[in-house]
Image: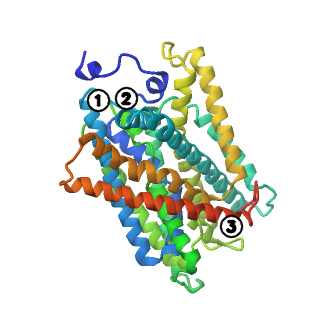
Amino acid sequence: MTEFELAQPKELDAGALFVLKSRGSWLHSGYHLTTAIVGPPVLSLPFTFAMLGWGAGLFCLTIVAVVTFYSYNLLSIVLEHLDELGQRQLRFRDMATHILGPKWGRYYVGPLQFTVCYAAVAVCILLGGQSLKAIYVLSTTDEKMMLYEFVVIFGCLMLIFAQIPSFHSLRHINLISLVLYLAYSACALFGSIYIGKSKNTSHKDYSVNSHGANQMFGIFNAISIIATTYGNGILPEIQATIVPPVKGKMFKGLCICYVVIATTFFSVAISGYWAFGNQAQSTILSNFIVDGNPLLPKWFLLMTNAFTLLQVSATTVIYLQPTNEIFEQTFADPTSPQFSTRNIIPRLLSRSFSVVVATLIAAMFPFFGDIMAFIGAVGIIPLDFILPMVFYNVTFRPSKRDLIFWINIAIALVFSALGVLGTVSSVRQIILDSKTYHLFANV
């Protein structure tokens, strides 16, 4: 037996055995990370600049990039350290249980991660429905179908994709997802530049168009959205897909991911805000159509929405994995083959049920910007900005004389405060928007 096999527990539960297969390379982890982090939320970055302005927008975008790269590396280092001790952790909740105690894993980290990932699934299904609707509106003048109908259609597609057996099985899909993401990010960039240089473009106003309390809450909302854009909440599960030994491999995957982030996040945010100023909408693609009239060639808009539709399919499946793993752990039998009737039937039923519920939620609450801000404040900030710092300090116990100890404490405290303020501001915005929107709204 190898050293790794001796270090592993004798028996893995069905969730770890079937969903979190450790067969991938560092390159595969890069694909997984990229699909988990980058995606359609990048199209909301110009909207955050509209609430922050040039200086604060660029500052927040840069700081969150630096902090998340640092945070994910800390999390990976802790996982590698535990692996070297023969205590490899495959899930976020297992990691929290081992480091902080069983109550933290069972009653806080586990439920929080499940809620964040499942909410992300619902948001992705909503985005898929919005992309389908955009393609429909561009393709016909007979607009009889409602948004919730497109959400249901996309949800039906996800019923099929949800049956992909394991995280590792997504590696080639996530490579395609990376290419699609680069494609529609480029479309957003060039579309914004084209419209921004157009003779018919309206006057661009870069001032923050709110004042007083509205401006303050808008700032916290914007920070929550940026945090969500950089967040993933499933790094331990992604690292679990790497074939042992894992040391140093996740860092390479993160480098790939952040090269893509540096290329796209800043270019889309800057070009979108430059083109539309404080009129940038919650997704920049909405600015490409004014009063039903496209500002770009229809074929370009159709292509952009098609790329977005296909890429968001992969993102949806990524965030289904923690839910799938929980279902497998609960209902599957690890002593039976993965594709036996005993395991296929519960998998088919549980995953289908999960997608149906998420589709219903997406159809009922089509308020994308508000949902993003709330998810970022209550879920992504604790998982990606606070807990990694706590895990590192508890695991390695650096001296209080060490700079890294105080850096971690400072980051945890600052983002704890931002999480609370972001939660208040996002809930406030949802309450305000509830006066305008209604269930199953055709937005």
Q: Residue 166: horizontal and vertical position, in percent?
A: 48, 30
- Determine whether, in the image, residue 329 is placed left or right of residue 349: left
Estimate how packed mark 3 is, as few (under 14), some (14 to 19) or many (20 or more) residues with alpha carbons within 10 Å: few
The quadrant of the rendering that contains the N terminus is: top left
Does residue 374 appear to the left or right of 363 in the view shown?
left
Which residue corresponds to the image point at 67% horizontal and 57% vertical from the top-left?
135
Residue with the mark numbered 3: 432
Considering the numbered disc 2 on the image, is that residue within a helix, a strand or a loop? loop
What residue would you read off at disc 1?
Answer: 244
Q: CA distance from mark 3 to mark 2?
A: 46 Å
Q: What amino acid is at disc 1? A: Pro
Image check: 89 left or right of 245? right
Which of these two is toward me, 310 or 44?
A: 44
Q: Give the SS element for disc 3.
A: helix
Left or right: 184 as drawn, with respect to 130? left
Q: Specify the amino acid type for callout 3.
A: Leu
